[in-house]
Structure formats: C-alpha cells, structure tokens
Image: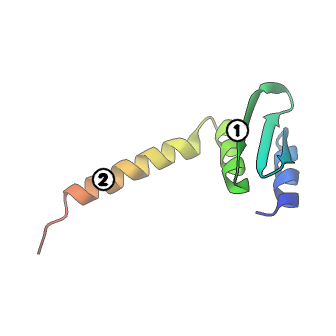
Amino acid sequence: MRWSEAKKWAGSHGYVIEKCGGIFLWFKKSNTSIHGEAEDLSKVAQDIYNDITNGVWVEYQREEAARKASEDIHIDPK
C-alpha cells in the first residue's frame, strides 16, 4: 500500500496517519485516545483494521498459529 492510498483509506474510516521521521503515527479522529505507531505502513494499516473490526485480524492470526501448531504435532514421520 502506498502512502497516499493508506492516508486516503484511513481517512475514509475516520483515522489520521502522519509520518514523523521513520515512524508512522495514527489515531482515530473521534477518539484520539485510540492511537498507535509503527515503522511499517502495512503494520499501521493492520492496526487500524484491527480497531475497525474489533480485532478480527489478530484473532485470525491466533487461530492460524494454533492450526499450524496442531498440524506440526500431527505430522507422521515417514
């Protein structure tokens, strides 16, 4: 995702992204206590998405990690 696209996407969901040196800062316009920072723009987009969806991406990652761990345990050596 490019910088201009990320700013536009965030703005369309009520968030602001600012770049300060090598760090991206973000916050929710209607509640500035909801905020974060990251060195990677994709991490900022992920954080905002998690806030919008109440942690759907985080939950998906946990489930996927558990699934992979379960597969690793059940692999039959040949």
Furthest toward the bottom, the residue is 78
The residue lying at 27 percent from left, 52 percent from top is: 70
Looking at the rendered structure, the kind of residue marked 2 is: Ala
Colour setup of the view? rainbow
Which x, y percent locates residue 50? 64, 41
User: Which residue: 27% across, 58% down?
Assistant: 71
Q: Residue furthest left?
A: 78
Q: Secondary structure at mark 1?
A: helix
Front one among 67 and 7: 7
Residue 77's quadrant in the figure?
bottom left
Q: Amino acid at mark 1?
A: Ile
**In this rendering, position of residue 18 left or right of residue 43:** right
Q: Which residue bears the numbered disc 1? A: 52
| Element type at mark 2 | helix
- Circle 2 is placed at which residue position? 69
Quadrant of the rendering where the N terminus is positioned: bottom right
